[in-house]
Amino acid sequence: MSGLPQANGQRYHFDIYAILEGSQELYFGHEVMINVNMVETVRLVLPNGEGIEKCYLSPTKRRGIERRCLLWAPCSNGKMLGEKLDCHIPKTCTKPECPVCAVYGGLITGKQTLIGRLTHGGGVAIQPLLPEEKQRAMHPSAILNDPNTNSPTPFKRQYNEPGLLYPVYNHCLSVTEDEFQAVAYAFLDSLARIGSGNPKGASLYEVDNAPLLVVDKYLVPHGARPVISPGETSVERALQIFQDKARRVNGGTGNGEHITVNNGNFERWIGWSAHQKLQKWADTFVNRVLKAND
Amino acid sequence: MIFTIRPTAGLTFRVLPGSILDITTYSFVPPTTLSGFLRRLAMMHAGFDFPNTGPNDQDTPFYVLPRELIPLGAYPVGACSRPAHRTYRKGPRDLGHRAFSDMYRGKASGRENIQLHTWEYLLTDELTGYVVSENEKELARMTGIVGYGSKMGKEGYAFVERVSGPLPLQRTELKAVPSTLIPADDLFEKNPRVPADIFTLYSFVWLETEEDRTESQKKQRRGKSTSLPKIYSTSAFDEHPSPVVKYKPFPAARVDGQTGVMLDYLHYEEIFIPVSLIETLRGEIVYE
């Protein structure tokens, strides 16, 4: 029915919910106006008719960063994973056994399609803080772009302000735990590489010394999903919603950071426990795939 | 029955026919998309894997709700991108190269041949979806999909947060704000001057199944056919493809959320569903 080979073991659905903080200003390219590099913003109309504009860490950009993190992952034989697998962008290998294509999908035009089972979401910043415009490559004596002097052209670049909070989500459908390990590795590895140009990097936002991070592994969704509406503008309210929903699991048993329902039909990890679980999966990915002797 | 659907991502419901380089989205969930989305959640609830409907298949299967459950689309509630969020992307014209993930590159051979795309996304807090049926029991079974989520449309992910109903609908003709789309012919025949957005939408064309045939037709058919009949889905919760053969286009209209229009409605409290929409989306049956 799915066209995929039968998995070696049970398939599950997995979700990652997190709130990221832009630790410094970030650039996510959008349009280029005359001499201004713009960042991507979204405009929303609220139910009261008021319009707001917010910075946006687009899910498609996070997906590209994550995929490259995997393709550029260091292997024990001195190659990068993409070279070892002969899997690239946009020339994907599209093999169901490729740890990258299996979850991120692949396409060989007209021949083979492997539908990705990982969807990225979220990204609309909570605070309605507009981007800052900065002057770059300014050279006071060479405003004209004279090819003989090879001088820089002045231009302006927008940046998302530091301290913006971005709720982000990764959803996986019908994947094995082995396949999800690549997603865990890519999610963690991509955090420091978010943004185009420099500076780069976002971090997991912490409240009371614990990251706002939830990881679900399930067959039946027993927990409320900690999702923040794109229209939410209050940080306080958004964090409250995230934390309340993270703790709302029907019929679960556990220690508050790891909750299990019905013999593992639903498992949720919260905060540091979720972070450790992702790290454990990422470690297994490194040992199983990147350090494999072949 | 009302489905409160919460998207977790920007959504693209590709407007067709459309352009390859300018991907535009409907500003709501089209009825056929809602049907496929809810069917997948029902299949996940029943323990089946997410079905593949990719182009590798010779005969692409459809996985949609059974014919007796008629989805009417889902519509944004709360904060919403109006118009849709439009992005600009540089995409490759040719996918047979590796330039976009190379770290060490010589002088570009030009193979990557970048072309500019625009791509639209609908961002919204919430969507309200409607499914109507004469079969209350089958409709009530759909309550089981609360909490499940999946990919939706061409891009994006959403989950069902709440389900209300089944709610009894009463037929009435009056001036009201419709909760859904309206077939354009019906709207303009009764309200010739009302301003509205017009879209091309699609309904299913169903293949006649064994259940549709009379006893004598079944006997005749058995005599003629030597091949085994294909197994088609009879419930949202089974694993078989649906007996859909194609889509049929129809012009649909959407009026803004304040304008009341005179139509023949089925209604429950503030929900007003044009009868003509249900009739159109019931679809056609073709006989082999």
Image (spheres, rainbow, N blue to C red):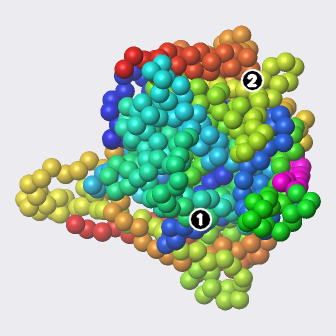
x then y, percent, for residue B149: 58, 40
Q: Give the left or right position of residue A133, taking residue A121 as reference.
A: right
User: Of circles 1 and 2, which is in front?
Assistant: 1
Q: Which residues are magenta?
A: A124-138
Q: Is residue A131 left or right of residue A279?
A: right
Residue under pointer 2:
A247
Chain for mark 2?
A: A
Magenta stretch: residue A136 in it?
yes
Residue A191 vertical placement versus A177 (above, below): below
Point out which mark residue A43 bears.
none
Question: Residue under circle 1?
Answer: B116
Res. A256 visible in picture: yes
Q: Residue at x 85, y 18 (%)?
A: A209
Residue B152 spot, x, y in % from top left: 55, 50
Between B12 and A23, the one nearer to me in the picture: A23
Along the line of sight, the residue nearer the viewer: A265 or A77: A77
Mark 1 falls on what kind of element? Answer: strand
In the image, residue B90 sits, relative to residue B50, either above or below, namely below
Three-letter residue code for mark 1: Leu
Q: In this rendering, is residue B194 above or below A273?
A: below
Q: Amino acid at mark 2?
A: Arg
